[in-house]
C-alpha cells in the first residue's frame, strides 16, 4: 500500500514539475532594419536563428532564458559610393519576464513579455569594400512582444530595439530586429 502511495506521489510531483519548468528548442526568422546616421538610405533584410529556451512558470507570471545562434543582415547606401550588404552572425542570450494575459490551462495561453538581449557577432562580412565599417562585436537590446502557447508549441513575435551603436568609428548604426519564432516544449 505504501508503494502505491509513493508511486502516486511521485507521479503528481513529476506532473507539477513539468508544469513549473519547460524547456525546448526554437527557430526564428529575423527581419533586421537599421538606423544609420551617416548613410543616405538603408534596407531591411532577413536572417534566421536557432535557440534553446527554459521557462519557469509562476501562476500568471513567467521567466524565460534563451541561448542560441542568429544571423542578421542589412544594407546601407551612401551617395557617390554605392550599396553594401552586411551579414552579421553570432551567439545571443535573452532574458524575458512575462505575464500570461489569457491563461487557458493545458490548452495554452496568450502572453505579453519584455526583456533584454545580448548578441556577440563572431562572423561579420560585407558584400564589397565600398562602405567600410568597424563593427562593435557586442550589441545590447531591449525587447517587447506577444506570444501564444498552443499545447506544446510556442509562437512569439518580438521587437528588439538596439541600444548599442554597432559602428565603432565616427558613424552611428543601431539595429531594430523584428523576430518571429516557433518553439516546442519538451516538458
Image (cartoon, helix red, strand yellow):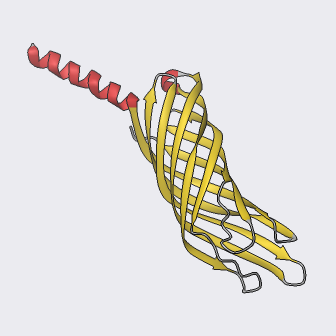
Furthest toward the bottom, the residue is 129
> Is residue 105 found left or right of 18 in the rendered image?
right
Q: Give the percent coordinates (x, y) of residue 64.
A: 48, 40
Q: Is residue 163 above or below residue 125?
A: above
In the image shown, does 78 or 87 lie closer to the viewer? 78
> Is residue 32 found left or right of 107 in the rendered image?
right
Q: Is residue 119 above or below residue 125?
A: above
Q: Is residue 84 above or below residue 110?
A: below
> Is residue 132 found left or right of 93 in the rendered image?
right
Residue 157 in view in this figure: no
Furthest toward the right, the residue is 80
- Residue drawn 68% across the image and 68% down it: 73
Figure quadrant of residue 19:
top left
Figure quadrant of residue 108:
top right
- Residue drawn 28% across the image and 21% down it: 12
Q: Give the percent coordinates (x, y) of residue 125.
A: 63, 78
Is the C terminus in the top left, top right, bottom left or bottom right quadrant? top left
In the image shown, does 126 or 11 lie closer to the viewer? 126
Is the N terminus in the top left, top right, bottom left or bottom right quadrant? top left
Residue 6 in view in this figure: yes
Furthest toward the top, the residue is 1
Furthest toward the front, the residue is 170
Task: Count how many numbered circles sit on residues in the image.
Answer: 0
Q: Give the percent coordinates (x, y) of residue 160.
A: 66, 50
Q: Give the percent coordinates (x, y) of residue 65.
A: 46, 45
Q: Is residue 37 above or below residue 81?
A: above
- Residue drawn 60% across the image and 69% down it: 136
Amino acid at each position: 500500500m505504501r508503494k502505491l502511495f509513493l508511486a502516486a506521489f511521485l507521479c503528481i510531483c513529476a506532473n507539477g514539475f513539468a508544469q513549473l519548468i519547460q524547456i525546448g528548442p526554437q527557430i526564428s526568422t529575423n527581419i533586421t532594419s537599421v538606423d544609420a546616421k551617416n548613410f543616405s538610405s538603408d534596407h531591411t533584410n532577413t536572417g534566421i536563428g536557432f535557440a534553446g529556451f527554459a521557462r519557469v512558470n509562476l501562476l500568471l507570471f513567467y521567466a524565460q532564458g534563451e541561448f542560441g545562434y542568429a544571423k542578421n543582415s542589412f544594407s546601407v547606401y551612401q551617395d557617390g559610393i554605392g550599396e553594401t550588404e552586411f551579414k552579421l552572425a553570432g551567439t545571443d542570450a535573452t532574458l524575458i519576464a512575462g505575464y500570461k494575459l489569457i491563461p487557458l490551462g493545458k490548452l495554452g495561453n496568450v502572453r505579453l513579455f519584455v526583456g533584454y538581449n545580448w548578441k556577440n557577432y563572431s562572423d561579420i562580412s560585407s558584400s564589397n569594400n565600398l562602405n567600410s565599417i568597424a563593427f562593435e562585436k557586442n550589441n545590447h537590446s531591449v525587447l517587447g512582444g506577444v506570444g501564444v502557447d498552443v499545447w506544446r508549441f510556442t509562437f512569439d513575435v518580438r521587437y528588439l530595439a538596439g541600444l548599442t551603436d554597432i559602428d565603432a568609428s565616427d558613424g552611428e548604426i543601431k539595429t531594430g530586429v523584428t523576430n518571429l519564432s516557433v518553439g516546442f516544449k519538451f516538458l
